[in-house]
Amino acid sequence: MAHPVSPLARPFPAIPPIAGVTPRVARAGYKDWGRCDLTYVELAEGTAAAGVFTRNVCCSSEVELGRQNVAQGHARALVVNAGNSNAFTGYRGREAVEAIMAQVSAHLGCAAEQVFVSSTGVIGVPLPKDKAKAGIEAALVAQPCGWEEAANTIGTTDTFAKGAMATAVVDGRTVTLGAIIKGSGMIAPDMATMLGYIFTDAAVEPGFLQALLSAANQRTFSCITVDSDTSTSDTVLAFATGAAGNVPLSSFDSAGADAFAAALEDVCRQMAHLVVRDGEGAQKFIAVTVSGAVSDESARKVGLAIANSPLVKTAIAGEDANWGRVVMAVGKAGEPADRDRLSIGFGGTWAARDGQPLADYDEAPVAAHLKGQDISIEVDLGLGEGRATVWTCDLTHGYISINADYRS
């Protein structure tokens, strides 16, 4: 069942072709839908690869093999299957992934470990090997496609295509980063979120690319939540073809490394926000900023406790300035907090300071703020210098409707 486009949707950006990257799509028919559902991306020889993966212990074979493959640091291809997550499918699921890797590696003449596979969709149904084989055969001879078509093909319950881009000057050359992502529900990453892919023509050593992606992830993908559920398939991969011809980035001492790192984090943050904006049933985009914590990580955990609270999320959905629910969420987070130092605000208006309601608190500006689509919640713990921002959406009846009929 198709769902209306999220009211928080953003238009797809004009991502240019990335040298050394060729995307194609095909229809494998994993579900009974009239659309392409297999994405194949061919990568130039020598492309560096890095990745972050779910910590869900019931992860898919795609995730297990991806973790192994990323250790060797290079990639020649990416295959993404939509409509079937191939998770909790035992040896049959692993055989299906290995068959895809073998088929593509034979075509390219590369090691199977340089073929990365992701799958997303219903859990517990083995990926049909015959459909995957036929879909890949079709993709290998298909015409190259644009990034928006590739983004649509990797989606499941997504209501709009999600993409991001940035540029940076590295070693005197302008390099481009383009990215696509899918994700709408089952979002509470312990590492990354759903399926996201970043492509750049910059030359970056694999180890440094991994370090940059892991650091960016901590401040972006690992700071979002839609429903507190961590997927079995969450994967974010970064691929650097080196086609721009810069001296390969190997550390922050390399020329342009700071600029590239900032661009990579910018792309990750753009994508993370887009996933929240397409949260199932979402009507409001919520930023929760926690300051005054004992550390940045403690602030992040407090922020996620607030962002994951059904009571907080439904209050925002109902445009109810119930700051008592925020107090509750801070207190249950399991992080250092002092009731008598706690301050809470909405949209820049403080409702409580130092553990007490403000005597002159005027709820009118807060009520006006909550009628908008972009909502901010501010919390000051008054304990230290730690600070973090996390992002979520409200919880509406639309979330129930989408997930109640997910398999139909």
Image: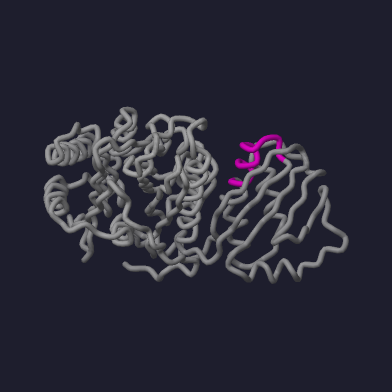
**Residue at 38%, 52% in the rendered image:** 178
- Splitting the image into 4 quarters, where does residue 69 fall? top left
Residue placed most toward the observer, 196 or 93 = 196
**Is the residue 257 above or below the residue 20 in the image?**
above
User: Residue sitting at 12 percent across and 37 percent down?
Assistant: 106
Asked whether, in this view, residue 230 is left or right of residue 362, the answer is left
Residue lying farthest to the right in this orientation: 359
Q: Which residues are magenta?
A: 293-304
Residue 189 is situated, as x and y percent measured from the top left of the image, at 47, 44
Q: Is residue 239 magenta?
A: no
Instruction: Left or right? Give the position of 314 relative to 103.
Output: right
Q: Position of residue 116 (x, y in %)?
A: 27, 39
Question: 396 or 243, which lies in front?
Answer: 243
Image quadrant in which the C terminus is located: bottom left
Q: Quadrant of residue 207?
A: top left
At a point 56% along the width and 53% down the height, the residue shown is: 391
- The number of numbered discs placed on residues in the rendered structure image is 0
Query: Whole-percent x and y of residue 229?
Result: 46, 47
Residue drawn at point x = 70 percent, y = 63 percent? 321
Quarter of the image with the N terminus in it = bottom left
Residue 6: x and y in percent read 45, 67
